[in-house]
Image: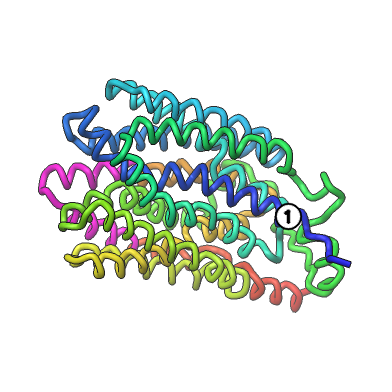
């Protein structure tokens, strides 16, 4: 008789699909659209277009605390469905945008709200509802969808834009988002294990590893916003992943243009982006395993070191193969960005207050996110190169490396400590 699959893995698969067609489309394609958007809407000024994506981050930050508070009590599935509809409509509007202010309104409000609802804030909350001992690996597999999208989307979107134009590209995004995601989430997504008579990690796992089922009182603590803002661990996580997120946003938006500037073709530039995403996809299970067994600190330091080194390599890369090498190193580094953020936050705060903490955390991360992409665009417009921007981003990554000293280790190491104390 076949062993019954724990339904939590179906939730992980749906989350990966959301990352593939949601976060992946949005994050990995916008750098490809950037030159066309700038030429059509702002006389070639890339900083103007970058501001639109920063507006989306502001709107998401405004919405996130209240949304996070709801997600810790309510239905992530319902929020995701609303987000899918908003994102699909926003893509339709983007395909027909005529002016810069229309672009700001659609991206800032539409995509800001839509991606916040259907993005990681929501489905990370779902995954944490389902997993404890397998949390790091479950999150890592869930976020692999975005990386797989990063492998496939750059060459496909580049070919699409080159052949049919950026407006057709956005219209195809709208159709694929709505048709592919809405039915899957509506019929298959489940909010919590008790909805299908299960427990976290599954009855089978809990029965076979009963000696490891140690109660962590801290994991059930309900935090207030005021308590979060007095926590050193919370601020440390905000600085670490605010830095990682702003670097990711800047690199994903501007790297394609940088690669064209050093002489690569659009096809080669797309392949470099795919190389970064490929290593990110392979790196996620590795980072998930490390976080489950070694905890958050070592995993975060490894991720930061790879990213800082890669940024410096991008400034020296003057050929396709050197650019691929730098992208591969960067891809492995940012593989841990999303799963480690969720793992560190859910262990240093608590899984019971994860979404609330995640929502408030957006405000700490917001200044980083707002500054990076426009600053990189400004530096390019002023100097004709992104190299100074890459140096600044590498320095930022190096500074926040002090942060892991102030967070909980988590994972099997900390669980064994609790067993000894118990």
Q: Is residue 55 visible?
A: yes
Image point (28%, 63%), residue name: 311
**Residue 372 in magenta?**
yes
Q: Is residue 397 left or right of residue 214?
A: left
Q: Is residue 309 visible?
A: no
Image point (33%, 46%), residue name: 158
Give the overall secondary structure of the magenta segment: helix
* Quadrant housing residue 111: top left
Image point (23%, 29%), residue name: 40
Residue 156: x and y, percent? 39, 48
Q: Mark 1 points at which residue?
A: 8
Position above or below: 406 against 81: below
Q: Give the range drawn in magenta.
A: 370-398
Image point (36%, 36%), residue name: 53
How packed is label 1: few (under 14 Cα within 10 Å), some, or many (20 or more)? Answer: many
**Residue 244 in magenta?**
no
Residue at the outermost bottom position: 420
């Amino acid at each position: 008789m076949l062993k019954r699959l724990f339904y939590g893995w179906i939730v992980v698969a749906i989350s990966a699909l959301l990352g593939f067609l949601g976060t992946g489309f949005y994050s990995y394609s916008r750098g490809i659209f950037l030159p066309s958007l700038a030429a059509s809407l702002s006389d070639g000024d890339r900083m103007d277009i970058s501001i639109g994506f920063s507006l989306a981050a502001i709107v998401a930050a405004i919405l996130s605390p209240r949304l996070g508070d709801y997600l810790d009590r309510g239905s992530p599935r319902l929020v995701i469905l609303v987000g899918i509809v908003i994102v699909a409509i926003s893509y339709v509007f983007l395909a027909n945008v005529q002016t810069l202010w229309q672009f700001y309104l659609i991206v800032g409000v539409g995509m800001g709200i839509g991606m916040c609802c259907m993005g990681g804030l929501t489905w990370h909350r779902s995954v944490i509802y389902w997993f404890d001992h397998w949390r790091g690996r479950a999150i890592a597999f869930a976020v692999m969808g975005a990386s797989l999208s990063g492998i496939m989307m750059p060459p496909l979107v580049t070919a699409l834009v080159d052949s049919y134009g950026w407006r057709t590209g956005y219209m195809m995004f709208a159709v694929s988002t709505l048709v592919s995601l809405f039915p899957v989430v509506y019929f298959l997504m489940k909010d919590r294990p008790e909805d299908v008579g299960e427990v976290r990690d599954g009855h089978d796992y809990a029965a076979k590893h009963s000696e490891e089922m140690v109660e962590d009182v801290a994991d059930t603590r309900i935090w207030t916003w005021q308590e979060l803002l007095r926590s050193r661990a919370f601020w440390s996580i905000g600085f670490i992943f605010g830095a990682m997120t702003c670097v990711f946003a800047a690199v994903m938006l501007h790297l394609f243009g940088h690669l064209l500037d050093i002489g690569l073709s659009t096809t080669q530039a797309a392949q470099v982006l795919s190389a970064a995403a490929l290593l990110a996809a392979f790196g996620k299970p590795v980072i998930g395993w490390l976080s489950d067994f070694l905890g958050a600190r070592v995993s975060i330091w490894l991720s930061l070191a790879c990213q800082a080194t890669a940024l410096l390599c991008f400034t020296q890369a003057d050929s396709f193969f050197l650019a691929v090498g730098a992208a591969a190193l960067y891809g492995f580094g940012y593989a841990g960005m999303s799963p480690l953020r969720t793992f560190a936050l859910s262990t240093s705060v608590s899984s019971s207050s994860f979404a609330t903490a995640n929502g408030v955390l957006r405000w700490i991360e917001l200044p980083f996110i707002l500054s990076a992409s426009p600053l990189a665009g400004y530096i390019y417009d002023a100097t004709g190169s992104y190299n100074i921007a890459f140096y600044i981003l590498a320095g930022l990554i190096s500074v926040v490396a002090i942060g892991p000293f102030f967070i909980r280790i988590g994972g099997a190491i900390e669980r064994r400590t609790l067993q000894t104390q118990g």
